[in-house]
Image: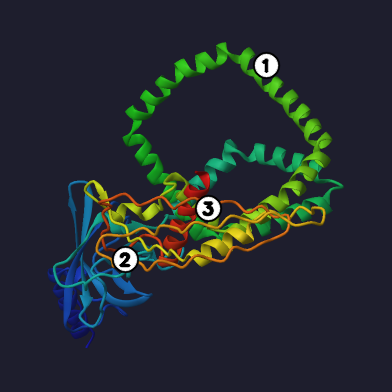
């Protein structure tokens, strides 16, 4: 029986040796079933070996099938279960199960960027998306350098001096640490704004670098101006000093004339009120003054070298005499006695217009007798010039204004004679 067991053991070991111990699946390894292969590039795989585990979130989902060197880059082909879904921009890292544990490949979704696509058979995770953890040997070597005189004596000196500086100032140091904690918390809360400001500064630096020649030319062009300013420094200083004295004098003058200025402004207030009350009448009057004696819209009545007018003459003699009597000077008292008789008024010749029937002649008016009132003698009305063109149309002024204006001009001409 012992011989049979030994024979079976030798046969088993020989079978394992022929296929390779690396091909023997490890306990707790990757699950069997459908899978896909991915090639991962590492700068250093440390002591990673085939059949090592491939994990996602610390769960074994595959194993390492092969490791080879391509130039200065280590390429690792891994087998991943088909049930695992990873983005096409996934990351990979060589990690360690414990301080002295085995190495494995950890696959994960990208951090800091959105996931894109889906990882599939034959994809490659490049060197830019892979990393490795620090080895225990590297940590111990760095610690050995510190302990072997690399900085331990300096740490002791720093600790002693720090204790001497803080002795008796514990409360102030604690308050400073508390304020530092508040400051750091504020910086952390404004992390996005700080990053945005740094990005904007980076863009500004890039633009300045692209325009380095322009900036250099501008700086070179500033040299003559700075030289001129340096030469005129005394004059500029004297001008600023004089400006200061002028400001002092101006302040004193304004303070001394404040009451008079307020009084002048108060005196101008009625004038300004009247101007404001006049409104747009003053601009209209100024507009009419520029074209006096014609209205501003006289241009609408000018045709070639003629002006279209519509004239209406009211030759009511009774109204004329009534106006003359109303405008007569007051009577001068005279001693009682028979007063002189006024001569009879001559009949007024009425003008005739072409195309109009002749006006009927008026009977002679009775001669009034007023004591002590010498009445003026009314001269005959001047006849109108023959051939006066009368063109029918719209006059710039109204009918009443035209009639009154013509009558006033007629009376003024008669009285001036």
**Label placed on residue 378:** 3
Asked whether 141 or 396 is in front, the reply is: 396
* Visible residue check, residue 185: no
Name the residue furthest front. 338
**Label placed on residue 219:** none
Q: Is residue 221 above or below residue 137?
A: above
Contact between marks 1 and 3 (CB within 8 A): the answer is no
SS assignment at label 1:
helix
In the rendered image, residue 287, in percent from the top left (x then y), is placed at 46, 50
Name the residue furthest right. 168
Q: Answer left or right for 335 relative to 224.
A: right
In the rendered image, residue 221, in percent from the top left (x then y), is placed at 40, 20
Q: Nearer the viewer, mark 1 or mark 2?
A: 2
SS assignment at label 2:
loop
User: Label 1: which residue?
Assistant: 238
Residue drawn at 31 percent across, 52 percent down = 299
In the rendered image, residue 364, in percent from the top left (x then y), is placed at 49, 65
Residue drawn at 56 percent across, 51 percent down = 377
Asked whether 199 or 13 is in front, the reply is: 199
Q: Answer left or right for 110 relative to 367.
A: left
Disc 3 from disc 2: Cα separation: 22 Å
Q: How is the image coloured?
A: rainbow
**Label placed on residue 358:** 2
């Amino acid at each position: 029986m012992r011989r049979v067991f030994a024979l079976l053991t030798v046969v088993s070991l020989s079978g394992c040796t022929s296929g390779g111990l690396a091909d023997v699946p490890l306990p707790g390894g990757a699950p069997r079933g459908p899978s896909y292969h991915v090639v991962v590039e590492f700068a250093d795989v440390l002591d990673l070996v085939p059949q090592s585990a491939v994990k996602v979130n610390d769960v074994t989902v595959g194993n390492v099938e092969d490791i080879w060197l391509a130039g200065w880059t280590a390429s690792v082909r891994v087998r991943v279960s088909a049930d695992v879904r990873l983005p096409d921009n996934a990351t990979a890292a060589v990690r360690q199960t414990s301080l002295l544990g085995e190495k494995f490949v950890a696959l994960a979704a990208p951090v800091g960027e959105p996931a894109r696509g889906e990882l599939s058979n034959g994809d490659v995770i490049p060197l830019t998306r892979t990393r490795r953890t620090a080895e225990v040997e590297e940590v111990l070597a760095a610690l050995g350098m510190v302990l072997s005189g690399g900085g331990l004596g300096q740490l002791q000196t720093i600790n002693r001096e720090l204790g001497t500086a803080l002795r008796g100032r514990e409360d102030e140091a604690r308050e400073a640490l508390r304020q530092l904690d508040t400051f750091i918390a504020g910086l952390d809360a404004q992390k996005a704004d700080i990053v945005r400001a740094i990005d904007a500064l980076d863009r500004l630096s890039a633009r300045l670098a692209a325009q380095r020649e322009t900036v250099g030319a501008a700086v070179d062009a500033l040299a003559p101006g700075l030289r001129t300013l340096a030469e005129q420094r005394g004059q500029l200083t004297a001008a600023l000093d004089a400006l200061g004295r002028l400001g002092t004098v101006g302040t004193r003058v304004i303070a001394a004339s404040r009451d008079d200025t307020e009084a002048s402004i108060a005196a101008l207030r009625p004038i300004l009120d009247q101007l404001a009350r006049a409104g747009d009448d003053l601009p209209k009057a100024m507009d009419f003054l520029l074209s006096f004696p014609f209205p501003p819209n006289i241009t609408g009545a000018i045709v070639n070298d003629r002006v279209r007018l519509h004239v209406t003459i009211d030759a009511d003699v009774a109204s004329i005499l009534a106006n003359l009597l109303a405008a007569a000077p007051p009577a001068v008292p005279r001693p009682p006695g028979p007063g002189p008789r006024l001569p009879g008024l001559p009949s007024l010749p009425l003008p005739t217009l072409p195309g109009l029937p002749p006006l009927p002649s008026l009977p002679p008016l009775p001669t009034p007798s007023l004591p002590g009132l010498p009445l003026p003698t009314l001269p005959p009305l001047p006849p109108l010039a023959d051939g006066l063109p009368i063109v029918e149309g719209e006059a710039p002024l109204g009918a009443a204004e035209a009639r009154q204006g013509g009558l006033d001009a007629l009376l003024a001409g008669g009285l001036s004679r």
